[in-house]
Amino acid sequence: MARVRSDAAVRERVRALHTRSRGPMGGVPRVHAELATQSARLGRKPIARLMRASGLGGVSRRQAFHTTVRDRNLRPAAKLVEHEFTAPAPGRPSVADISSIPSCVLRSQ
């Protein structure tokens, strides 16, 4: 019962911090630091638990990373290179093995 009361009190303090900062003030580290300046002896994990339960979270100011977006209305490019992945004869590899090249030769290039 005591934990429920203390959780409610901390939850209200966290909400007050968010309201005072005119929106999400930051994630758990910032809320923890702000509560520490107010001489509240709380760990980061209980603060994180209460913030999750309240639906509060930090703000990421990073922009989303977008790669090239394919235009689905265009036809894909034709295969310009005809790849042949079959061995010319049994027991003969169709690719080169570069593990036999000494490392000193690779470094000098």
Image (spheres, grey):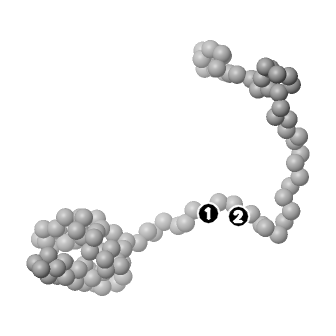
Q: Quadrant of residue 22?
A: bottom left
Amino acid type of the residue that numbered disc 2 sits on in the rendered structure: Val
Q: Is residue 48 above or below residue 23?
A: above
Which of the two residues, 90 or 77, is positioned nearer the viewer here? 90
Taking the spot 34% from the left edge, 77% from the top edge, the residue there is: 56
Q: How many marks?
A: 2
Asked whether, in this view, residue 36 is left or right of residue 85, the answer is left
Q: Quadrant of residue 10?
A: bottom left
Q: Quadrant of the N terminus?
A: bottom left
Q: How far separated are the C-alphas under marks 1 and 2?
A: 8 Å
Return the residue at label 1: 66
Which of the two residues, 27 or 49, is positioned nearer the viewer here? 49
Which of the two residues, 45 or 13, is positioned nearer the viewer here? 45
Q: Is residue 34 above or below residue 67?
A: below
Identify the secondary structure beneath mark 2: loop
Q: Quadrant of the C terminus?
A: top right
